[in-house]
Image (tube, rainbow, N blue to C red):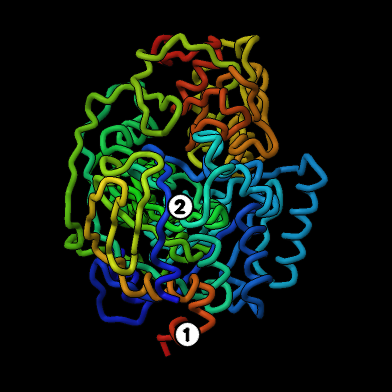
Amino acid sequence: MVEKILARASGRRSVQPGDVVVAEVDLLIMHDLSGYLTSRVFDEQVGGEVRHPERVAMVFDHHFSPPTEDAAAMLEANRAWARRTGVHLLDCGNGNIHHAVVQRGLVRPGAIVVGSDSHTPVHGTLGALAVALGNDSHAGTVLPYGKAWFRVPETVRVELVGTPPPGTTARDVALWLVGRIGEGGLIYAAVEFAGPYVKELGFWDRWLFPLLCVDLGAKCSFVEPDEVTEAFVAGLPAGAPDRLERGDGGEASTVLRFDVGEVAPQVACPPTVGNLADVPAVAGRPVQWAELGGHAGGRLEDFRAAAAVLRGRRVHAGVRFNLVPSSREVFTQALQEGLVLALHEAGATWFPPSTGSNQAYNMGAMAPGESMISTHARNFPGRNGSPDASMYLAAAPTVAASAVTGTITDARELR
Amino acid sequence: MKALRTTTRGRCWTFGDNIPTDRLVKTKYVVEPMEVIVQHVLEDLNPRFPLDVAPGDVVVAGKHFGQSSGRAIAVKALRATGVGCVVAETFARTFYRNAFEVGLPVLELPGVTDLVSDGDVLIVDVAGGLFRNETTGVERAVPRPDAFLLDMLEAGGLIALARSRPELFEDQRR
């Protein structure tokens, strides 16, 4: 499928892995930080007009409200640049960059999506070819020409079969896979997630798989569009696609098969995403912070799971449990389902839609010795404040259960 | 010109596996001026590095170097230290791409971490596909990167390449 998309967008009949092609880009997404860096490079080293401003979106997601004068000035510079060039601007409060552009209907199956956020490949969940490029790609060729260069990747199909035991979520399976395949285990590959386990998941659970491909070192990742993709896209503002790009099943050079039938709930421990443990192996470690949010979290599914864990329980007095919807649309739905009141009354705190504590721009900075468990995608030391703070990554039920007890806790133990 | 950009000789600085861009340039420095950033590159992993790194030196790392955020500023900061080349077992692909785009030579060489120690004098020629440890005498031939990548490196990066050869990026779908 990746080869078909790249061939079409580069005006060729076909392409082969290893070819370098220059292809038309359908959407460039930038957040407040990458947008600031990219627009500076563009203005200072390239100049001229943005050729297709309607194909560029800037989303303010690291900030939901600038906490310093410098941050306010940076956002103002971004707004001025967006007004001058005419690109889409999704200002503070719209949500996390990736969730927000999907909810707006800006990502289409079969499209080429680029962005300098390393989780840009997550848009492969819609059957797009989505790749993280650097600021110089955006400033040098995407903004002035609407183009980018790509080396055609080899496709590796990851087939997931089996049904995990009760209490194991799609997030647990996704984390477990990083441990199995290994960080950097699929460098430069286009990873297709397939097999009955993936195909039976809903759209936002599928989302968690292309999200992790950056940790495997992959170039991009996708789930081949099907009826789930089509129904999801049909419900977005731009409506149903004209056509769904499908592969012919022949591109994969390697097929990896995993049985997920015995996967236990997982925790990624410091210092990297691939340092995984079954929850019982690390249960009892104290946490002062818990958070549902980030590129991997803040989904409606996460708040439903947390509400189920917190029903009849309260957040531990020693824990701040922060809830960050991934988009305005998710917050609306959480309100309508009564989740906002239920989680508020249980002692959790709602924050505006954003990328949450990722890199501690608005919130989530930690002092030395503190620990956080979250649905975020990253846990590198120093990412949220002190390099001597600890970040654990887990699924929403584990995060919520840990918020209840003040230590890393297996949600199955609270039943 | 070619030799200047793709060949380097200098002391070796070793780092481990899975080093994220966060550790090259911490988030709190990303929007600072380069003269500030460059004083903090990799400081958490080796406090001597930003103080003692010299032009032409070579960073040698393990697997998946430059993972995490795609920030090109991490590559620009490494280039700003004067490092002449980064050699790693494997690179995170956004880092690898960014390196050629901003004109920092990088070379992928499986097993390289077993061939070097901190302080060894290394010669690396990316365009010529050669890695040599002068201190130990060990030498390895390495496959050359794709011609497009070498063109970019020799032009001084992607923006320079697009300026000198705009026809590469004009519309092919007429």
Q: Name the one closer to the observer, A385 or B174.
A: A385
Please say whether residue A412 is visible from this viewpoint: yes
Q: Is residue A130 visible?
A: no
Q: Sequence order check: which comes first, mark 1 or mark 2? A: 2
Q: Identify the residue shown where x is 49% and y is 54%.
A: B83
Residues under numbered marks 1 and 2 in contact, where contact means CB atoms less than 8 Å apart:
no
Query: Which residue position is annotated with label 2?
Result: B57
Instruction: From the top left corner, tell me how far across and down residue B47 is, in percent.
Output: 55, 35
Give the label on residue A175, or none. Answer: none
A57 up-or-down from B12: above or below: below
Using the image, name the chain to which the residue with label 1 belongs: B
Residue A363 drawn at (x, y percent) = 68, 33
Q: Which of A237 and B32 is in front in this view?
A: B32
Q: Which residue is drawn at 26% across and 67% down?
A: A18
Percent coordinates x, y for residue A257 in the rendering: 18, 41
Q: Quadrant of the C terminus of chain B?
A: bottom left
Q: Which amino acid does label 2 sit on?
A: Asp
Front in this rendered view, residue A131 or B42: B42
Instruction: Name above or below for residue B88 compared with residue A280.
Output: below
Identity, as a three-letter code, of the amino acid under mark 1: Arg
Q: Please tell me whether residue A284 is drawn above or below residue A247 in the rendered image.
A: above
- The chain to which mark 2 is attached is B
Left or right: A23 with respect to A354?
Answer: left
Q: In this view, does A41 lie to the left or right of A186?
A: right
Mark 1 vs mark 2, CA separation in Å: 31 Å
Q: Which mark is residue B165?
A: 1
